[in-house]
């Protein structure tokens, strides 16, 4: 097989050499010479030798011309002979980093994104293959598809032959490639690359092109990388590391956005914290952000300065208010910079009409105070819209009614409960609910010890001992309450002796049995009395939490509820903290699956998912997912195609004959750390490449010529033979042609 087969039509020119030799052999001239007889005798003796030399000279000249033609035609051989002569085809295995950091703008290349420069490397390989029209193969592994490949899915191209059709297919595919919005470890591509090298090394020469920006954050575990590249080399592969970025650039990224703890309800102001990081080496001044609520632009925010290499401290905090209940969108956008994908952050806020608080009070109680009255006034005063609604019920309500509709439950005295009520309360907490427990004159310590505490298996944090008096401190006048740590319910108070709580006097409290080291798993003391005894304790129980006050909520054992403003603050923060325990806190990242679970009695099991668009890349599209019913009355499914950051709308169709649809929203964001622009030190990268006998190149200076020259053809071998033939022809001609003829 020849690259330029049309040149073989020049082979008949070999006949001209034969013709010229024949003409010279049979051309006679009459020479007058007296000693001719002696010459004739000598000629007869050496005629055979001279004839053989002339024929050999003619053959050498024919071989020289044939070698020139064959060399220009570029023959290619396969099989064992082809391998020996350098004609073994190449298998170009391309590892393409398409994580979103490859969306960086490469200023040295005229402002194009560095991913385009990476694509340019692949185009060079393909274009060179097109010129040689050979049997080379090409495989492409994109970083964003590595996980799928490792689970048995094929790459986009696996050993595709770079003939005319294959080259066109690759070119068409390259036009559709763009950086993903995912964050991946580039080293993950080495395992499938080693597999391809192992499969093809016997029949081709594998060349692995590792094209990446080589960010330092992705190259921490270098021992594993060296091991994998070493394995590729051992299997017979050549490794070329190609860096697509020219230099580090400044980049700002939004790392998180979340609601601040508090009352989250309709028509109540909420606060959102946003963390922004400066990945650059210089301070960023006058950084502008846009805030969008339900796709409507709000007043922009300008940050005076974000220090180089640091997070904005404190985080940017801004208020939002939603006039109606339901699901709402919040989005913030940074001003454009080197990498666009980490300049946006989305948050879905599920806003209830109000926070529902269930107050459980004893049916019969001692004393003149109604504990529910004090809590109602603190949580939902009639003159202020607090976003909280309270409902007061007796203990029997717990077992007779569903509790999941309530955001929190306040047990306003630790009175005996029916076993069914205890079970309902424990299930409520285990499923993520929040409960507040107060003790008081009506508390039954045996019930608390045996049922609520239950040898630390129940919801009460410690085993009770007895109701005790807190003796007055007449000498030092220290506050009765000391704050421990920075729990949300005390976030507005300083740690230790808080001036705001200085006016609270505790007369009685429930003393409890503490372990020697005062530590119990899942139990955290939030506040102590001045004698060191716990006053407020938090216990995690299942997926929920219980906060216990070892004094009364009504001003029976204390004076807290008698006009002290700190009481209102703590009750509001307590309601917010307990209600927040049921809120979904997980934030989805690009590539994370969206778990969907709906009530199968209300909705059809088929759902439509509206996938967000990506500017300049993809339009909004709709996917359909079939859910599977289970024994719990739910229809469940997993939607895995979260390749774009944005808001995903899950549309639910009701069973009734109506076109009405319910929409659930999910926010999917990019992983912030991928926006870190710090590059791996060039000398370190060069040493790494050298340690595994790999080449290190830049995308701008990449060349494929030596790969094809060495592996695609055996023309070099023909050239060497041609030189040998020409030297032999010169030597033989010098022996045959007399000196007088050579000198003219």
Image (cartoon, helix red, strand yellow):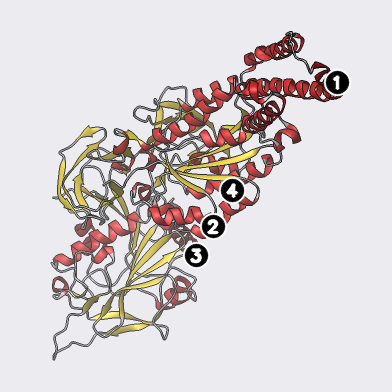
Q: Quadrant of residue 297?
A: top left
**Disc 3 element:** helix
Q: Nearer the viewer, residue 683 or 142?
A: 683
Q: Which residue is mark 2?
A: 224
User: Which label belongs to residue 15?
Assistant: none
**Looking at the picture, does residue 6 appear above or below residue 264?**
above
Q: Which residue is mark 3?
A: 419
**Badge 4: few (under 14), some or many (20 or more) residues near its Cα, within 10 Å?**
some
Disc number lying in front (2 or 1)? 1
Q: Which residue is mark 4?
A: 191
- Residue pictured at 20% horizontal, 57% vertical: 314
Q: Quadrant of residue 296?
A: top left
Chain-order first, disc 4 or disc 2: 4
**Disc 2 element:** helix
- Find the distance from the CA under tag 2 to the CA under tag 1: 84 Å
**Badge 1: few (under 14), some or many (20 or more) residues near its Cα, within 10 Å?**
few
**Disc 1 element:** helix
- Find the distance from the CA under tag 4 to the CA under tag 3: 57 Å
Chain-order first, disc 1 or disc 3: 1
- Find the distance from the CA under tag 1 to the CA under tag 3: 138 Å
User: Which label belongs to residue 41?
Assistant: 1
Q: Quadrant of residue 509?
A: bottom left
- Find the distance from the CA under tag 1 to the CA under tag 4: 81 Å
């Amino acid at each position: 097989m020849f690259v330029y087969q049309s040149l073989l039509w020049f082979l008949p020119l070999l006949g001209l050499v034969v013709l010229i030799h024949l003409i010279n052999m049979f051309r006679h001239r009459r020479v007058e010479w007296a000693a001719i007889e002696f010459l004739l005798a000598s000629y007869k003796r050496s005629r055979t030798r001279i004839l053989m030399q002339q024929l050999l000279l003619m053959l050498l000249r024919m071989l020289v011309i044939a070698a020139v033609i064959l060399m220009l035609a570029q023959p290619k051989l396969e099989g064992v002979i082809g391998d020996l002569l350098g004609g073994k085809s190449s298998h170009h295995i391309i590892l393409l980093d398409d994580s979103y950091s490859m969306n960086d703008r490469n200023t040295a290349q005229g402002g194009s994104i560095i991913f385009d420069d990476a694509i340019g490397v692949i185009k060079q390989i393909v274009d060179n293959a097109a010129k040689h029209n050979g049997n080379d193969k090409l495989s492409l592994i994109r970083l964003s598809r590595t996980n799928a490949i490792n689970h048995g899915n094929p790459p986009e191209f696996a050993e595709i032959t770079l003939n005319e059709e294959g080259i066109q297919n690759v070119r068409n595919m390259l036009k559709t490639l763009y950086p993903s919005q995912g964050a991946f470890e580039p080293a993950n591509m080495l395992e499938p690359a080693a597999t391809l090298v192992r499969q093809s090394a016997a029949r081709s020469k594998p060349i692995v092109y590792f094209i990446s920006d080589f960010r330092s954050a992705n190259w921490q575990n270098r021992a594993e990388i060296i091991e994998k590249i070493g394995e590729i080399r051992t299997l017979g592969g050549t490794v070329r590391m190609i860096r697509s970025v020219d230099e580090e650039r400044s980049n700002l990224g939004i790392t998180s956005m979340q609601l601040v703890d508090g009352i989250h309800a309709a028509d109540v102001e909420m606060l959102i914290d946003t963390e922004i990081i400066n990945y650059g080496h210089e301070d960023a001044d006058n950084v502008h952000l846009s805030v969008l609520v339900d796709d409507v632009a709000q007043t922009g925010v300008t940050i005076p300065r974000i220090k180089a290499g640091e997070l904005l401290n404190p985080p940017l905090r801004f208020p939002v208010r939603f006039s109606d209940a339901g699901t709402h969108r919040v989005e913030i956008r940074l001003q454009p910079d080197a990498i666009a994908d980490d300049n946006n952050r989305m948050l879905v806020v599920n806003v209830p009409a109000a926070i529902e608080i269930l107050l459980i009070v004893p049916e019969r109680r001692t004393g003149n105070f109604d504990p529910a009255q004090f809590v109602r006034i603190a949580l939902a005063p009639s003159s202020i819209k607090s976003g909280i609604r309270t409902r007061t019920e007796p203990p029997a309500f717990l077992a007779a009614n569903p509790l999941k509709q309530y955001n929190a439950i306040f047990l306003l005295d630790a009175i005996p409960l029916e076993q069914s009520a205890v079970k309902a309360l424990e299930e409520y907490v285990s499923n993520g609910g929040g409960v507040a427990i107060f003790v008081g004159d009506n508390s039954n310590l045996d019930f608390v010890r045996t049922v609520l505490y239950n040898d630390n298996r129940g919801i009460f944090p410690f085993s009770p001992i007895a109701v005790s008096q807190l003796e007055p401190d007449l000498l030092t006048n220290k506050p009765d309450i000391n704050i421990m740590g920075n729990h949300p319910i005390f976030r507005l108070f300083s740690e230790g002796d808080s001036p705001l709580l200085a006016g609270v006097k505790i007369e009685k409290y429930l003393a409890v049995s503490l372990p020697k080291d005062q530590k119990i798993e899942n139990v955290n003391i939030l506040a102590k009395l001045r004698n060191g005894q716990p006053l407020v304790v938090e216990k995690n129980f299942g997926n929920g939490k219980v906060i216990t006050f070892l004094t009364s909520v009504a001003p029976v054992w204390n004076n807290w509820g008698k006009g002290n403003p700190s009481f209102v603050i703590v009750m509001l923060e307590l309601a917010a903290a307990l209600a927040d325990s049921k809120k979904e806190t997980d934030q989805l990242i690009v590539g994370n699956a969206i778990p969907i679970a709906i009530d199968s009695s209300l909705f059809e099991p088929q759902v439509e998912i509206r996938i967000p668009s990506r500017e300049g890349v993809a339009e909004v599209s709709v996917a359909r997912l079939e859910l599977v019913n289970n024994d719990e009355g739910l229809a469940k499914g997993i939607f895995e195609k979260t390749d774009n950051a944005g808001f995903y709308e899950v549309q639910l169709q009701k069973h009734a004959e109506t076109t009405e649809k319910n929409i659930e929203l999910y926010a999917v964001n990019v992983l912030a750390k991928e926006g870190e622009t710090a590059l791996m030190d060039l000398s370190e990268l060069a040493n790494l490449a050298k340690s595994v006998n790999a080449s290190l190149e830049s995308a701008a200076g990449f060349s494929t010529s030596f790969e094809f020259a060495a592996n695609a053809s055996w023309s070099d071998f023909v050239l060497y033979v041609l030189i040998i033939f020409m030297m032999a022809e010169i030597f033989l001609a010098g022996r045959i042609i007399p000196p007088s003829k050579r000198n003219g």
